[in-house]
Image (cartoon, rainbow, N blue to C red):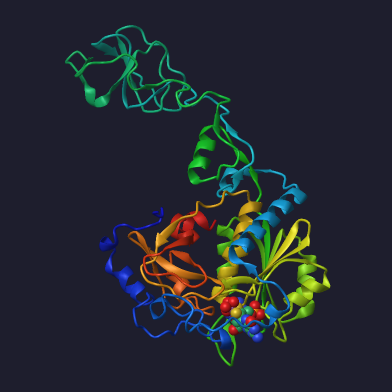
Amino acid sequence: MTSPGTRADADAEDLDVEEALALVRETPGHGSHDNGSHGSHGSHGSHGRRDSHGGHGAPAPHHPADAHHQTTPWPEARATAERAARTAARAARRTPVAVPLDAALGLTLAAPLAALTDLPSFDTSAMDGWAVAGPGPWAVRDEGVLAGHAAPAPLIDGEAVRIATGARIPPDTTAVLRTEHGRSDERGRLHPTREVVHGQDIRPRGQECRSGDQLLPVGTLATPAVLGLAAAAGYDTLTAIPRPRVDVLVLGDELLTQGLPHDGLIRDALGPMLPPWLRALGADVRTVRRIGDDAKALHRAVTTSEADLIVTTGGTAAGPVDHVHPTLRRIGAELLVDGVKARPGHPMLLARLKDDQHLVGLPGNPLAAVSGLLTLAEPLLRTLAARPAPEPYTLPLRDAVHGHPHDTRLVPVVLRGEGAVPLRYNGPAMLRGIAAADALAVVPPGGARSGQEAELLDLPWATGGIGVCFT
Ligand SMILES: Nc1nc2c(c(=O)[nH]1)N[C@H]1C(S)=C(S)[C@@H](COP(=O)(O)OP(=O)(O)OC[C@H]3O[C@@H](n4cnc5c(N)ncnc54)[C@H](O)[C@@H]3O)O[C@H]1N2
Ligand code: MOO
């Protein structure tokens, strides 16, 4: 199957792009330096060529929490997130709102778009030229007719008047003659230079729609074209499902917000990455707060949030300052997903805090956070925003991808021709692969052979473009 985002013209790619990709592309026989740094998971992120059959060389997963709870298979985790959002949307009775056109991009229509006017709303000229009455030659009036000007006087037979595209057609006009199809004689009379067909180049009122006609159904995504159509049809606002509100809480005492890493401190990569990505998934990101490794601050932030979804980063594992689980226990939250059979990102979690409020806990490792974002936050936000699920598609993998023995792997790929090329630097702590990627390939437990079809999760910028997706 072919992706809409697939580039078939690989040969035509300009060199700069290929050079950039060479920095991250999987290369046969290349030593693996793409893995996470944490002990027992050291080789689950290793790349394809070394082992195309899965199994050998991959250590058994070892998560201390595994002993205490059941991790959810990856497809089930996504389905659970979608279901949770459906229940929440009912509980919250997410009332449609009237949104000005310039704020409605990306929303889902909650009411059908019915024309508030005929389109066109008057008989109008499709061309610059003359409105003419009867067969030529014609006597040409002195005053022309322009778009947006006063109603023109009726024509009489044998008369013509200069007319602009979009201007009102004078009553009793029989055709519009294009500028390039008329010539004037020495007495100033207008002659056609080709046959004139009755009604030509006149757009009659209501040609596109009549007032009250349904133009688009409920559930339509407000694209730029939809905004244009709505304006043409007389709308100032659209009735739409509001964006789900999201608060982002970034955990970790080790995070810097500017400058170079130093003294064991690192830059916060998630603070800049998540808000625009969440917006692309349909969210209205209200706040991004950095709250360190402070259990009290986390508790306060979670219990005072009015968001539909709280997204936390870090603190999901079992370390001494991993406060997410204890906080959820303390407030009596219901864990719907507590760990997913996914690499990276297996400590990700989804909790119901209230009937209409959820929390997605993303692991701190940046690519693990992306994995959690696409596994749990994407279906949840999409469903709350009433957006349709993207059409699933597969492409053959250009190289084998090493699999985890039990878990699904999400591996950054670029789309080239009719295939997906796995990228290196796909370890949980790395963003180098995903930053160059068009999509994530879903690699089943055990791995995938070269040529094997893999499901792909598109990245919003790869298909939609930055400007469209991130507003
Ligand atoms: N004993 C075990 N330790 C860990 C396990 C495990 O199973 N047993 N799982 C590992 C895996 S896998 C992941 S993923 C992480 C998840 O950890 P947390 O969600 O608790 O995240 P932290 O410990 O806070 O951070 C992990 C890592 O990521 C860095 N980080 C955190 N936030 C950011 C940020 N905003 N920007 C950039 N980098 C960030 C942090 O400094 C750590 O290096 O746990 C493993 N441990
Ligand atoms: O493998 Mo973890 O889940 O690094 O992301």
Q: Quadrant of residue 399?
A: bottom left
* Residue 222 can be seen in this image: yes
Q: Is 408 above or below relative to 417? A: below
Q: State the residue at coordinates (29%, 58%).
A: 9
Q: Is 228 above or below relative to 358? A: above
Q: Quadrant of residue 109?
A: top right
Q: Nearer the viewer, residue 293 or 415?
A: 415
Q: Nearer the viewer, residue 35 or 312?
A: 35
Q: Quadrant of residue 348?
A: bottom right
Counting from the top left corner in percent of width and height, residue 288 is at 66, 69
Counting from the top left corner in percent of width and height, residue 94 is at 72, 48
Name the residue furthest top: 157
* Residue 255 can be seen in this image: no
Split into 4 quadrants, where in the image is the C terminus? bottom right
Name the residue furthest bottom: 263
Counting from the top left corner in percent of width and height, residue 13 is at 29, 63
> Is 115 situated left or right of 207 in this image?
right
Q: Is 270 above or below relative to 378? A: below
Counting from the top left corner in percent of width and height, residue 58 is at 51, 82
Q: Nearer the viewer, residue 379 or 149?
A: 379
Q: State the residue at coordinates (72%, 45%).
A: 95
Split into 4 quadrants, where in the image is the N terminus? bottom left
Ligand 1: quadrant of the figure: bottom right
> Is 35 situated left or right of 358 in this image?
left
Q: Nearer the viewer, residue 312 or 169?
A: 312
